[in-house]
Amino acid sequence: MSERSSRDSRQRSSKSVAAGQVQRRTRSHGSSTSRRPVEGGRPTGRTRAEDSRSRSGSGARSASRSSARSRAPRSTSERLIRQTEQLRQRAVQTAQKQASYEVDQRIRKRLSFAVLGIVFALLLLAVWVGLLQTVRRDGYHAASINQRTRTTIIRADRGVIFDRNGNEIALSVPTTTVFADPQLVLDPVGTAAAVTSILQLSAAEHDRIVAALSKREGNFVYIARQIDKDRANAVLDLELSGVSSYTEPARVVESGVAGAVIGRTDPDGLGISGLEQQYNELLAGVDGKAVRQRDNKGNSISGTGSMITDPQTGSDLVLTIDKSIQFQVDQALLQRVDQLKARAGTVIMMDSRTGDIYAMSNVRRNEDGKAELATGNFAAVEAHEPGSVAKVFSVSAALNEGKVTDSTEFMVPGVLREDGFVIRDAYPHPTMKMTVREILTESSNLGTVITGGTIQPEQMHAYLRAFGFGATTGLEYPGESKGILKSTRKWLGTEKKTVTYGYGYAATPLQLVAGVNVVANSGTYVAPRLVKATIDAEGELKETNAAATRPVLKPEVATTMTSIMKDVVCSGTATLAQVKGMTVAGKTGTGYKAQDNGTYTTATGGRKYFASFVGYFPADDPKITMLVSIDEPDGSSRDRFGGTAAAPVFARLANVAIQELDITPTGTGTGCPADAKSGH
């Protein structure tokens, strides 16, 4: 049998079997009678009627089987489709259930994490609250109080500065300071405009206030400090939010008397110059403070209480200055500087025995060309070459060393050349014989060089140091200059000669008056003194230590020098220093001022002068030693010299001292011989 026939046979057999199976299932489903046993393939026990019916219905069954055979493939396909759809639906349902389960699980996890997070946050919050209420309570409580607390410093009054007679010179007076709290200011620009208009502040101040209030940093900005009460009230009456005021003391120097000596304080009451700075710790006292709690509008919170620490007033100073003398000295110096069109002027009046300074005046011409009292004590802080006043020291040194006497004679040339430098006297003269007395009386440069040359440069240097040059006076005044005094090793060329008549070293007016006072005080140096006593808060007065002293000259040498210096006033270069009813001894000085070009000649070929006179009276029993210096008087005037620019001021102020200090006159005349030249 071929392969094809075999396949066909198998296919037919398969179809017959399938058809038989379908037929049997059809019969089984279609018959409601129970099957009976069969024999030989036929049913048993069937009746004829049943058999007949069976035959008669065979055609129908045959047709039915044919129809069933035609529908079988369709029913199977539909059933498979239905089963597939059911499987798909079950799969979708299963997937949906799976997805729903997974979502549910994720939600459960998230809820669990959220619950844990909330629980953890609550625990942290509980711990933090516990810390705030326990460990950190004090710190935050203090911070909260600090936020609403305002502390106001209550400035202590500085001690009063009195003159030697108990008159007030410098004192603290109440003033009003206006300020603002930027955090409470509602309109920075409007507030600044209002206060600027009322207080007539500058545009720069307006801009400063606007900037400070706009930043809203801190809780305090100054609007105006230490103004009078009426102006402050004009601002406060506006009731500007955040603007307030307080009272604080301001320093006042009455009539500006001795203002340069007393110095200044800053707005906070700190001494920044002069005696105010030197004695700041003693004068300042201890500030107090007021602590109050305020609300956001700046009002005090009732029931919170306040704490006030009272300020402690500083101690007082009693100066050696005489207020009345100081005032008259100021006026006389102002007038003279103005008359001579000078740059500046200085007067120092001191007690010849104690070193107490009765007056120390400084006048300067300001940028507008007006002479006015200076704000700086230039008498102690500026040094100049002393000029001819220095002849007192070189001649005294030669006398003290026994190299000369007042009657020793020298042949004095009209010109002296030293290392190419020409030294001349102020007036031309041929070589002439002069005594030491005449040399000093006529203020001969050349004669002084010869007299001073009788001792070694080292000795001259030692005497200059003893007279107080090259070191401060011991006054310990802030900024006090020690001047310039080089060692002899640095004295080059003509400097060994010029130091004898006042060039080659520099001295302050304070050093100069103290140096000349050595002669007035019988050869003993006494340091200048400005503070006589202090008064503490309990009112106890304590005298300061007496001024330091040291011997410089023999008393007899001082007596000889006084005799010579009386001649200077009576018949020499200082006749305009004569005082009616009083003997006066002194010495003039007219020094050239060194210029920036390293010479004593200006760019226009002229010279600038430093004219001075230092004297004392009564000459034989000195009570007062006084220096008058005029800085840069009119160089074209005959009043540019010490004898003409400064000596007349000395005479005028000597009369002031005589009256104020009740100094006994020495006679009715000037204390000069009848044939002496008159100063007036």
Image (tube, rainbow, N blue to C red):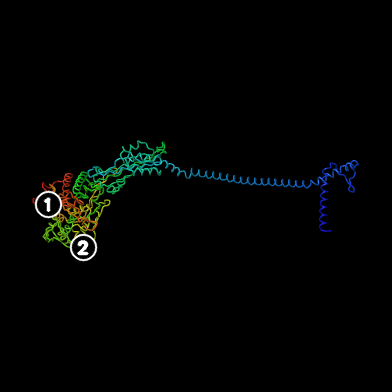
Query: How many numbered tags mark residues here?
Result: 2
Between 654 and 679, the one lying in front of the other is 679
x and y, in percent, of residue 628 in the image: 19, 50
Instruction: Using the image, tell me which numbered label, if any, was put on residue 570.
Output: 1
What is the three-letter code of the residue carrying label 1? Answer: Cys
Q: Is residue 116 left or right of residue 385?
A: right
Query: Reading the chain from its start, which is encountered first: label 1 or label 2?
Result: 2
Q: Quadrant of residue 561?
A: bottom left
x and y, in percent, of residue 485 in the image: 23, 58
Q: Is residue 387 visible?
A: yes
Task: Give the structural element (helix, strand or loop) at label 1.
Answer: helix
**Residue designated by label 2:** 493
Q: Residue furthest bottom?
A: 419
Task: Give the structural element (helix, strand or loop) at label 2.
Answer: loop
x and y, in percent, of residue 205 in the image: 34, 43
Tell me the crowding category of disc 1: few under 14, some 14 to 19, or many 20 or more residues within 10 angstroms, Cα based: many
Q: Residue furthest right?
A: 48
Tell me the mark number nearer the camera, choosing from 1 and 2.
2
Q: Quadrant of residue 419?
A: bottom left
Instruction: Using the image, tell me which numbered label, if any, was put on residue 183.
Output: none
Q: Residue furthest left?
A: 675
What is the three-letter code of the residue carrying label 2? Answer: Gly
Q: Is residue 497 left or right of residue 64?
A: left
C-alpha distance separating marks 1 and 2: 36 Å
Asked if disc 1 and disc 2 are in contact, CB closer than 8 Å, the reply is no
Q: Is residue 320 visible?
A: no
Q: Is residue 271 left or right of residue 136?
A: left
Q: Is residue 311 above or below residue 587?
A: above
